[in-house]
Amino acid sequence: MAEPNRVAPDGDPRRAPQDSAEAVVEAAHEHLRPARVAAFFDLDNTIIRGASAFHLAVGLRRRGFFGTRDLLGFALHQSRYLMMGENLRQIDQVRARALSIVAGRSVAEITAIGEEVWDEVLSLRVFAGTQELLTQHLRAGHQVWIITASPVEIGELIGRRLGVTGALGTVAEHVDGFYTGRLVGDMMHGRAKARAVAELAEVEHLDLGACYAYGDSTNDVPILSSVGHPVAINPDARLRRHARAAGWPVREFRGRRRTAVRRSTHAASLAGGAWAASLVIRAARRALQR
């Protein structure tokens, strides 16, 4: 596992560049061909504010894929994620329900809905600072990969829209173009991300010691630790502590007034939960009146 080896643009290895996206990218070793350098970006809360799968779920709900009760569950998961970061047990529960929802549906149908959700919602939730980092890496000739626990189709869709090299994500099994409701392999999360990156590095002949990784959660520590240039973006509390102890750069793109952001997020989450709960209550009342 590669140890962090951050080199400033002036060649001083004691000073990690943190002032601008361009300074971060310029830290690549000059003697390496750019094609041997890659940047790996987590998706949720690193590139996109919140959980991309939640916004896809909202789009599916509008098209009648599932009921209000499921939407309430997804909304509560989104609220907890924004306020407290990732929780593996909750992610596993959401994954299982999501697989059951898409079982029997065509890949083309889900992908088309994903395109609409990108245009309507996700494109407006890309962090400007992360977008700048992506652009700088691409200009430097680096490969840029999205690594996400979300369905690989969503990662690839967003990757195409952002013009990156490719995406790795959780693979839902499909036969003859229709989802079966089962996974292929493990969910792309935690150590699975690090394993996928190691395998990709062999195929693409990447030097992981010269590569970059960006993540927001303590669950991203394995992939961040596997490259020479780990950077915590919008980190949760545990990753922030880990980054401070390890000497990793921290980039905050959620706004300068972080306290105000947290308060507004908390208020929005409570409002969203109350709204979803009210829908469930009204639906229950209508059922009782019948």
Image (tube, grey):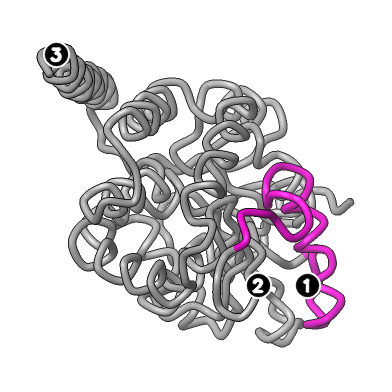
User: In the figure, 276 relative to 116: above or below?
Assistant: above
Amino acid residing under circle 2 = Ala
In the picture, measured across the screen, residue 128 lies left or right of residue 290, that is: right
Distance between mark 2 and mark 1 Cα atoms: 10 Å
Quarter of the picture containing the C terminus is top left
**Pointer 1 local density, CA inside 10 Å: few below 14, some 14–19, many at least 20:** few
Distance between mark 3 and mark 2 Cα atoms: 55 Å
Residue denoted by label 2: 38
Q: Which mark is residue 200?
A: 1
Q: Nearer the viewer, residue 91 or 233?
A: 91
Quadrant of the rendered image containing residue 146 = bottom right
Q: Nearer the viewer, residue 29 or 279?
A: 279
Single out the mark in the foreground, 1 or 3: 3
Residue 169 point in image, percent of width and height: 61, 61
Magenta-highlighted residues = 180-209
Quadrant of the rendered image containing residue 5 = bottom right
User: In the figure, 28 relative to 97: above or below?
Assistant: below
Mark 2: which secondary structure?
A: strand
Single out the mark in the foreground, 3 or 2: 3
Residue visible at 56% across and 46% down in the picture: 215
Residue 95 point in image, percent of width and height: 57, 42
Q: Is residue 225 visible?
A: yes
Q: Are marks 2 and 1 in contact (CB under 8 Å)?
A: yes
Residue denoted by label 3: 285
**Pointer 2 local density, CA inside 10 Å: few below 14, some 14–19, many at least 20:** many
Amino acid residing under circle 1 = Leu
Single out the mark in the foreground, 2 or 1: 1
Residue visible at 27% across and 47% down in the picture: 61
Q: Is residue 183 magenta?
A: yes
Mark 1: which secondary structure?
A: helix
Mark 3: which secondary structure?
A: helix
Residue 104 point in image, percent of width and height: 52, 62
